[in-house]
Image (cartoon, rainbow, N blue to C red):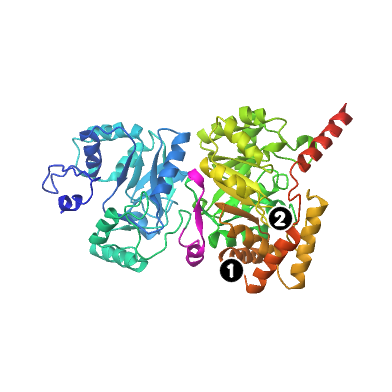
Amino acid sequence: MFEDWAKDWEEAVLFNDGTGTNETRLGAVACIYLPVDRIGFEDDVTVIGGDTLFKDDFDLASVWQEFRRRQQQTPDASLVLACPCTDEDTVKVGILETDDKRVTAFLEKPGPSQTTSRKSCPCFYVLSKASLPLIEQYLEERKEGPVEGRDATGNFIQYLYPRLPVYTYDITARFDVGALSSYISCHQYFLRQGSLQSRDEIKMSKQHPKGEGHMMQKSKSKRLPATFLPGFHDKGAVECMRYNTLGKTGLEVSLIGLGGSPFGSVFHPMSLEMGSKVVRKALQSGINYIDTSPYYGNRKSETMLGKILKDIPREAYYIATKVGRYKPNVEEMFDFSAEKTLSSVDESLRLLGLDYADIIQVHDIEFAPNLDVVLKECLPALECVKKAGKARFIGITGFPLDMYRNILERSTVPIDVALSYCHLTLHDTSLLDLIPYLKEKGLGIINASPISMGLLTHRGPPDWHPAPAAIKEACREAALYCQSLGVDISKLAMHYTLSQNATDLTLVGMDTEEIVRSNLEIALGTLTELEKETLDHILKRFFEPLKNKSWEGIEVKNYRAKLKDVEGACH
């Protein structure tokens, strides 16, 4: 049967242990070592038990991403899955005890009173190449003993974790197809999900692939992102959300992301209770990207997010923070040195309560005293951070668009993501000219503030907004015109930005649940005829006539003047 199955899969190689009865079997651990030994394999190995199946939220790529991240920190590390189980089931499975997701004990079928852990360990392991010689060592030590000692794969994990680090990757559920009843339950689940394909359909998908890297594709259900977790997310909302791949990072990010400045009370005060409601509503509705910075509220944003995220599964979101911009007072506002960069990353992770951030970005590069400090200190420090497993990717942010070319052409450190703000709005679309270059470089492209830091709202911008008077006046008049027709200019602004389909992700600050709901409706909906007519009118009447559509250079000039005054006063 297996040989017949393998004919359709060029990648499959079958090994036979040569035994013919249950009494003479080699045992499961020996069968893991059999192909490793026969083909002289010297690389990391994924081991999957034939009776172990997972729900359709399981994502193999995410497991391997976590394995690679762990190996950046500890090259010899292996990874096992951890699946929740009930009190009654502890006596049926191997139980993992962990400290910060590192395995500290493996208990074979303990009673519920023998452990507080309810994490079972299904037979799915990613074993590092450093662990492979230990399989042979394990078998050699047990060659004279009963076959049962070589038959339970969990026994090897029990042998492995005291010798080499073993970490866990949490999953929601699994099927242990060891009997007819569990097989029927599993089969019914996949029938309901519309995930089953016939043998002919699978062969057809191999002959006519629908996309690079796809051997199989679900026939009915929409593919969910790797961040989807049953029981946490609103599946219907997640299925409605649009996801884009963030450049070469491979991260599937939601069309809109959660900007972190409101959590620092940058525009208006926000309570922890409201912040928690906003984050939960956003994430459960399919938004899976959070952006923050030490600068937002002098680390208030990171502090609040850390308190909120401790009760939210880490797998449910991607998060980015920044380095380079810190305090509100001019003399301590910017520091792009390597020393400050490294210490800031550690402080950010401490406040966020995380082992790593998905992306760490250099914040507002144009304020650096010169580009050399960014190129020779800040970015190399972030490369060390990435190698240490504290960040997965590196990004840059800033207002002047020519800055991106300057950095990308000169940097010896690979840059994965570019974040631009206020350059894809009703009054300024200059980012569209830079995007082809960024895409050519393989960068993920993030756009922020479609409402231009409050300019495109009915209540207007904060007092500190750097836009020149002409832009502020045009935005104010456009907002008043919209208001006279009962139209929300912020809705028009966000719709206009998203309708360009130019970036992978747009960051939006949201400070109430109602604003989250409203932004989701805007992102996934359309405009009424009145709104379309109003949008066309304000573009032609108020924004196209603007000669200067941006405030590039104004903030840097003001900052340097204030810094000079402070330094002069000190002397």
Where is residue 374 shown, x and y percent of the image? 64, 31
* Residue 303 falls inside the magenta stretch: no
Res 16 quadrant in image: top left
Q: Which residue is the extreme one toward the left?
A: 20
Where is residue 523 shown, x and y percent of the image? 58, 63
Residue 195 appearing in the image: yes
Specify start and end residues of the magenta stretch as a single range. Answer: 229-249
The residue tagged with tag 2: helix, strand or loop?
Answer: loop
Residue tagged by mark 2? 427
Residue 463 appearing in the image: no
Residue tagged by mark 1? 526
* Side of 135 relative to 460 (left or right): left
* Side of 80 relative to 269 (left or right): left
Hey, what amino acid is under mark 2?
A: His
* Quadrant of the frame with the N terminus: bottom left
Hey, what amino acid is under mark 1?
A: Thr
Q: CA distance from mark 1 to mark 2?
A: 21 Å
Residue 226, placed above or below residue 481? above
Between 531 and 557, which is closer to the camera in this rendering?
531
Mark 1 vs mark 2: which is more N-terminal? 2
* Residue 237 falls inside the magenta stretch: yes
Between 139 and 210, which is closer to the camera in this rendering?
210
Residue 510, placed above or below residue 398? below
What residue is at 78 percent from the left and 66 percent from the top?
480
Where is residue 548 shown, x and y percent of the image? 76, 49
